[in-house]
Amino acid sequence: MDETLFAPRPITWLSETDNLVPDNILSWLYEQGSMTKRLEQHCQRVTVIPYTQRYVTLDALSEEEALSLPVSEYYWLREVIMYGDNIPWLLGRTLIPQETLTGEDQQLVDIGAIPLGRYLFSHDNLSRDYIQIGLQNSRWIRRSLLRLSEKPLLLTELFLPESPAYKI
């Protein structure tokens, strides 16, 4: 199996009726705007270091990811580490079906070290179907199905221990 930032450990996804999430974390997990912009409020500089940027096939997706996205011959996989003032705060994993990458949105494969939120939230044609929250190894995680020009992409964000999301 190819290397990935996201550990193969199981994720415990929570239902909307679960009351396990502290209020200070809840506002981070259900952030509707750009997570990049939210993180920028807590540091001088947000940077992104890409770990993986490549096309993958359906077999590289977890079962849950495959069920969340339409079947495609290829998916663009981008995994990054997001830093606030050089401290790792967040792991991001984006899966984009090949069919989403048309027209102007083809630029998504070339954003490199630009935070995804900076690209996505600069477009008027962005919507979010849902946010799902959970835990992986006592770390909070969220997954969003976003639509850019009504075409889907799946974004998973794992909050690392030094993230301001854990600060009271």
Image: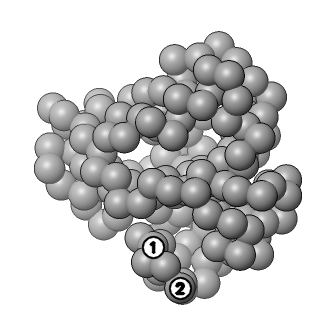
In the picture of the structure, the residue carrying the numbered disc 2 is 1
Q: Nearer the viewer, residue 8 or 2?
A: 2
In the picture of the structure, the residue carrying the numbered disc 1 is 4
Q: How far separated are the C-alphas under marks 2 and 1?
A: 9 Å
> Crowdedness of circle 2 by 10 Å Cα count: few (<14), some, many (20+)?
few
Helix, strand or loop at label 1? It is loop
Q: Position of residue 42 (x, y in %)?
A: 25, 37
Q: Choose top left, top right, bottom left or bottom right for residue 33.
A: top right
Q: Is residue 78 left or right of residue 70?
A: left
Q: Choose top left, top right, bottom left or bottom right for residue 139.
A: bottom left
Q: Are marks 2 and 1 in contact (CB under 8 Å)?
A: yes
Q: Is residue 152 left or right of residue 141?
A: right
Label 1 is placed on what type of residue?
Thr
Residue ID at (25%, 57%)? 88
Residue ID at (30%, 45%)? 48
Q: Position of residue 35 (x, y in %)?
A: 45, 38
Label 2 is placed on what type of residue?
Met
Residue ID at (62%, 27%)? 105
